[in-house]
Amino acid sequence: MSNVYVIGAGIVGVSCALNLLEKGFNVTLIEKEDGVKETSFGNAGVITRSSAYLINNKNLIPSLKKYVFNKHSAVRIKYSYLLKNLPWSSQFLYQSLEKKSEKNIESLNSIIEVSLDEHKKWLKKSGNMHRLRENGWLKLFHSKSGTQSTNYEQSIYKQYGINFELLDTEKIRTLEPALKPIYGSGIHIKDAVSVDHPGEVTQNYIDLFVELGGKVIRDDITRLSQEDSKVILHGRSFYNADEVVIAAGPWSNDLLKTISRPLPMCFERGYHQHFEYPNEMQLTRPIYDVDSAFVLSPMTNGYRLTSGTELNDKDAKINTIQLQKAIQSVQNSITLGSPIKNSLWKGNRPTLPDSLPAIGPHPECKHVWLAFGHQHVGFSTGPATGRLIAELIVGQEPFINITPFLPKRFF
Ligand SMILES: Cc1cc2nc3c(=O)[nH]c(=O)nc-3n(C[C@H](O)[C@H](O)[C@H](O)COP(=O)(O)OP(=O)(O)OC[C@H]3O[C@@H](n4cnc5c(N)ncnc54)[C@H](O)[C@@H]3O)c2cc1C
């Protein structure tokens, strides 16, 4: 059986590795870090079909004036970075036109709607079902009329059968009595679920992969090359792969650049910080305060507060201004315990212009497969991506339409 190497042991890489192992390949997972530390660790742990309502939808351009001066903590834009990244910026805006974005929403929905079942398969096999909270998530607005700004979003939810309910102050208090009464309206996405430690879920999938016979190597792959019908991975050692899957999240283009053109990509950085639970009532599910632009998720190790996004280079200096604003705002919403020492984290979401991940064969480099660009939804869609990659490599008909995700759309 062929030797397949998967580069990157985040949720996407490990899901590719597990699915490939199941198909009978000899699979090696290569990871540069000691443990799960990147976006698969630091995310909010929410798996929700409502994320099919992608950011570059037809409302993006009309709402830009809210964000251009970096006054709203939902988005912070480093303009020199966007200018340097003009092909991405212009295509991202172009893809927000109504017809384009509605097609992209349909495609994103097709992978998100199968994601929970794919996760459940591996959660069960790895003994992690107890981590799953199947009680939805809340999008909250300060004013009573807040949800009126979401009419288009609600129409998309209805179109795709996403189960939601509009909430008033009282219903919000009934669902989450730990919240202070500052919210005037909200949306309960009822079929959303969440996990209480995405990093441990990913680590447990890695442990399961090893238990089932997979191999994990710690190495930092710096370049790829092709010789005859093999792909050579260059790290501290050399590895001869029959097939290689690039699942290195935000670093994927660094590897791709060594054998091909990179894909147009932007980094949407996010920060988080943890807080102790107070000695009183706690949230039972994650909440998204839309006006103050933070998500608060109950985790095994306290509340995780995540900030809005910063459009900046992945190696740019840390700027916690959005997180600091979130820390101020969250005190109005709920009582938190003390900040947990050394829990500040940053990570970069890799976003492609159509907000869809690239999944499938490299159109010009044989035996090279791409599985990256999962923007805000990679924790959810990792396992479905892994199944698609394994089905494609083995030559099986993919279980959902793969066309919108194929990397060849960028070549
Ligand atoms: C603040 C925040 C909140 C989020 N919330 C959610 C959420 O609630 N739900 C959701 O679905 N998604 C969420 N996301 C997005 C999600 O976390 C990502 O899309 C997902 O984790 C991407 O997984 P990945 O495996 O592609 O990347 P990563 O988890 O970043 O993994 C890539 C791995 O590749 C390794 N690697 C890189 N280069 C090399 C190399 N050269 N050699 C060897 N190894 C290498 C890295 O060390 C890393 O471990 C959030 C993201 C952020 C930042």
Image (cartoon, rainbow, N blue to C red):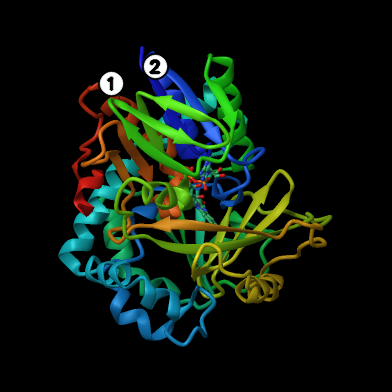
Identify the disc placed on residue 394.
Answer: 1
Q: Secondary structure at mark 1?
A: helix
Instruction: Tell me the element at label 2.
Output: loop
Q: Is residue 168 above or below residue 206?
A: below
Question: How many residues crowd mark 2 within 10 Å: few (<14), some (14–19), many (20+)?
Answer: many
In-image side of 205 versus 65 (left or right): right
Res 171 quadrant in image: bottom right
Does any portion of residue 206 appear in the rendered image? yes
Q: Quadrant of the N terminus?
A: top left
Q: What is the three-letter code of the residue carrying label 1?
A: Val
Is the residue under label 1 in contact with that under label 2 (CB below 8 Å)?
A: yes
Lateral position of residue 46 relative to residue 260, left or right: right
Q: Residue at x 79, y 62 (%)?
A: 339
Residue that badge 2 annotates: 25
Residue placed at 58% from the left, 48% from the top? 38
Q: Residue at x 64, y 70 (%)?
A: 323
Relative to the observer, which residue lies in front, 39 or 54?
39
Q: Is residue 129 visible?
A: no
Q: Residue furthest front?
A: 227
Residue name at image x 48 percent, y 65 percent = 186
Real-space Cα distance between discs 2 and 1? 9 Å
Kind of residue sitting beneath label 2: Phe
Image location of residue 53, percent across then percent down: 33, 58
First in sequence, mark 2 or 1: give its number.
Answer: 2
